[in-house]
Image (spheres, coloured by chain):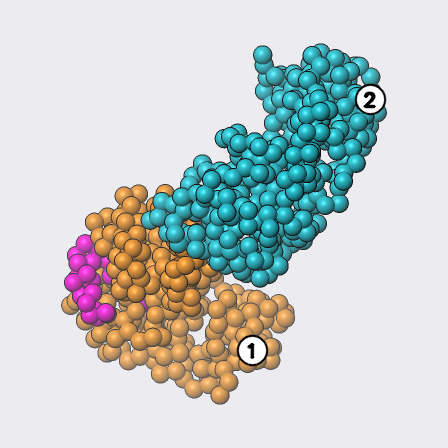
Chain colours: A cyan, B orange
Amino acid sequence: MIEDLVDRLRLVRSPGIGPVTYRQLIARFGGAAAALAAVPDLARRGGGKTPQLQPRADAEREIAKVDKFGARYVALGQGLYPRLLAELEDAPPLLIAKGDLNLLDRMAVAIVGARNASAAACRFARGLAHDLGQRDLVVVSGLARGIDSAAHDGALGSGTIGVVAGGVDVFYPPENEERQRAMYERGLVIAEMPPGTEPRARHFPYRNRIIAGMASGTVVVEAAPRSGSLITARLAAEAGREVMAVPGSPLDPRAQGCNQLIRDGATLIQNADDVVEAIRIPASQVRSVAAPYEPIEEINGDDAAKIVEELLGPSPVPVDEIIRLSGASSGAVQMALLEIDLAGRLDRHAGNKVSLRTA
Amino acid sequence: MIEDLVDRLRLVRSPGIGPVTYRQLIARFGGAAAALAAVPDLARRGGGKTPQLQPRADAEREIAKVDKFGARYVALGQGLYPRLLAELEDAPPLLIAKGDLNLLDRMAVAIVGARNASAAACRFARGLAHDLGQRDLVVVSGLARGIDSAAHDGALGSGTIGVVAGGVDVFYPPENEERQRAMYERGLVIAEMPPGTEPRARHFPYRNRIIAGMASGTVVVEAAPRSGSLITARLAAEAGREVMAVPGSPLDPRAQGCNQLIRDGATLIQNADDVVEAIRIPASQVRSVAAPYEPIEEINGDDAAKIVEELLGPSPVPVDEIIRLSGASSGAVQMALLEIDLAGRLDRHAGNKVSLRTA
């Protein structure tokens, strides 16, 4: 069992405390209990109301539910937590996982694509997943219809992880219940949301970052322009992972998304060997996006907080720029941002940018 | 009419005088007549027999034939000669052309591909050729079955050039007679071989270098691995031109060649706009492979010839390396090589390499 799980969960489930804030709180205060205790004071200094922390009883109820379902928590910073996922700046602080946890320790490739993909593309995805399994790679996908389902099916015998947008115990789409149950037994199902959560549109991009973040590379098989699969590809690229795409005839409108990805620099993939070649560079050589639990320096005083607040506006600004412009230490700026964040007055954006929340 | 055409033709048609040798002879002696006169002496100095120069009467007979057919010669170094083609180290010294010579002066794109291409790929090639024509680009291809024919058909209204492997008056394949006759009227047909030449397998790579050499870029549409189309693509790349390929599903074996080209760095093409974008860099900015008629320096004496001969062996060596190792001037080395060449004792290879011919 994870030490201080209740405290961690209370932090994670408290409104206004996202993964980035969570990470900084833990880094600053050394643990979840100390962070929880510090939040009210931090928020007051940030000029806002005390955030509504999750009641202890609610956290305990969720833990009991997860336990009863036969799932377990995997916490950022623990040995079981997927190493590549931990590199994300906004890595989920807690995952809920049901199935074979050993799969978390193996090198993984994501296969994603359209829900309404062609039969040929689904067949290709299934074959590719199978062949990657033969090369000791775990296949990660999103347990959606179409390409995702085909990828899981192809790798069920060798190792596959399904990341769901809702609760680990929720079957979406409903026709995937049998597949998801098979993966509890022979694969692994992962969720960030609490059990019982029905997936909503806003959950899917968060789910996609986990898929891209766990994998050494993401293969897109048939994706419409502006689809969720392309978001996953973008997240993979932002995390410094290999982006791969399966081409198709320009006469086939369903091939447009992948062909465009290749034009934009994705590696063209024809088979499992192409994937293995693309991800051959050890992940350890990939630049770490965020060093986990980097210690934050001591605060420089209230001056820093004031300067930081003056530098913030409604337009997102890189945190690095605020540090540079403020003349304050990185630690002091992070601390000031944390306070404003916990006061409900900060928005965090992709690429480590922040803005002042507008009423 | 081209001045000294008879002399040029006699040089070109003499066995043992290829395009590279021709170019160097003209550069050294200032004209075809002087070069013709010098060949016997050069060959003797190179330690071989005098090459069998084409009889004057044969050249005159070919010229009469070309004239009667309504075609004409276009000579390297003349204004009409395609500017990009002249950049090739082994640019054909003389082209025989029948049709609209104005097409030689416009920016061109090559479209090549499999003779047994799918109907869908042929349809794509025809549409692409048409759309490139709408963007003022001339479409060059090889008047073969399949993709070539489709490309010519699509661009017949806007401007298309067919480069044939045999004589300008020979229809190969025979079913293309109607198409080729239409291009005499509304397009342009080009040949390097004398009229009446039936194309042989060895002629096609020479034909392909003209296609690739005339065009700012080459688009490959469906090509089998190790096919002539891929040779054309390689020749285009070697000439510093844009290589483009149309992708296809990995499940379609006919897409393998193009997908591999894209993996190797070719630009993925979905439509005419993609082509225009790819070739947008003006061809004038492309590094010239060989400056036409660069004057060769005076000979340094017989010493250079001896040193050069000692540096030559059965393995191809870059000419630049021979120049460097010999310590002689570039002109002296070129001259020595020319003599050995005309004596039938030199083999010239791609990438400006040479070797001593082995019995």
In the rendered view, does B188 fall on the left or right side of B87? left
What stretch of residues is rendered in magenta?
B170-192
Crowd around label 2: few <14 · some 14–19 · many ≥20 (10 Å): some
Most extreme residue toward the front, as rendered? Answer: A68
* Residue at left offset 65%, top offset 16%: A345
Q: Is residue A332 above or below residue A223?
A: above
Which secondary structure, mark 1? loop
Q: Is residue A142 above or below residue A320?
A: below
Q: Is residue B175 magenta?
A: yes
In the rendered view, does B212 fall on the left or right side of A263? left
User: In the image, which is nearer the foreground, mark 1 or mark 2?
Assistant: 2
Marker disc for residue B315: 1
| Mark 1 and mark 2: Cα distance apart in space | 71 Å
Q: Position of residue B40 (x, y in %)?
A: 41, 81
Quarter of the image where one finds residue B344 = bottom left
User: Mark 1 — on which chain does it sit?
Assistant: B
* Residue at left offset 56%, top offset 34%: A166
Q: Which residue is mark 2?
A: A299
Instruction: Look at label 1 and name its amino acid.
Output: Ser
Residue A260 seen by the camera: no
Crowd around label 1: few <14 · some 14–19 · many ≥20 (10 Å): few
Marker disc for residue A102: none
Residue A56 seen by the camera: yes
Quarter of the image where one finds residue B85 = bottom left
Instruction: Look at label 2 and name its amino acid.
Output: Ile
Quarter of the image with the N terminus of chain B is bottom left
